[in-house]
Image: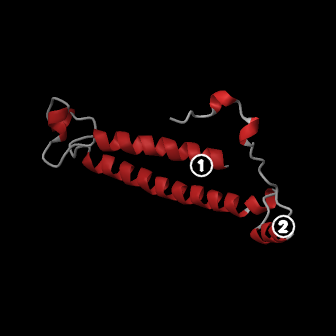
Amino acid sequence: METLVLIVHVLLAAAIIALVLLQQGKGAEAGASFGGGASQTVFGSTGSGSFMVKITALAAAILFSTSFALAYFAKERAANVTEVGIPSASVIESAAERNQLPVLEVPRSADLPSSDMPQAD
């Protein structure tokens, strides 16, 4: 389900970008952009303004809801992290008190090859 919501979210984002780029500015007329009078426009004599604005607003509303859905999925996944084997803070603290934490072994300088050692001036 999360993958489906993510795909819809990405497609809506691309659609909003395209819709915003297709819209005309306030001073431009729809007929001038299509090379004819009002009777020859694609969206009728009222122009493309109201149609494009409504579609953009609908796409933005759906994008907003998919954002909330993705946030909900992320919250659920974060809540389930402790259930997959990551110890809680109290378990780590109790292991530290008993000195049962793993220790990183650091190699001694005698174990390193001499070519890796910087030469003193």
Residue lying at 75% horizontally and 38% vertically, measured from the top left? 110
Q: Is residue 58 left or right of residue 119?
A: left
As drawn, the label of residue 95 is 2
Image location (x, y in percent) of residue 35: 16, 29
Image coordinates for residue 73, horizontal then vertical, percent? 64, 57
In the image, residue 107 above or below residue 60: above
Residue underneath mark 1: 5
Tell me the element at label 1.
Answer: helix
Q: Nearer the viewer, mark 1 or mark 2?
A: 2
Residue closer to the observer: 81 or 95: 95
Q: Nearer the viewer, residue 39 or 2?
A: 2
Residue 98: give x, y in percent of width and height.
87, 69
What SS does tag 2 mark? helix
- Label 1: how many residues lie within 10 Å, few (<14), some (14-19) or many (20+)? some
For the residue marked with disc 1, what is the amino acid? Val
Which quadrant of the structure image shows residue 95? bottom right
Residue 31, placed above or below residue 88:
above
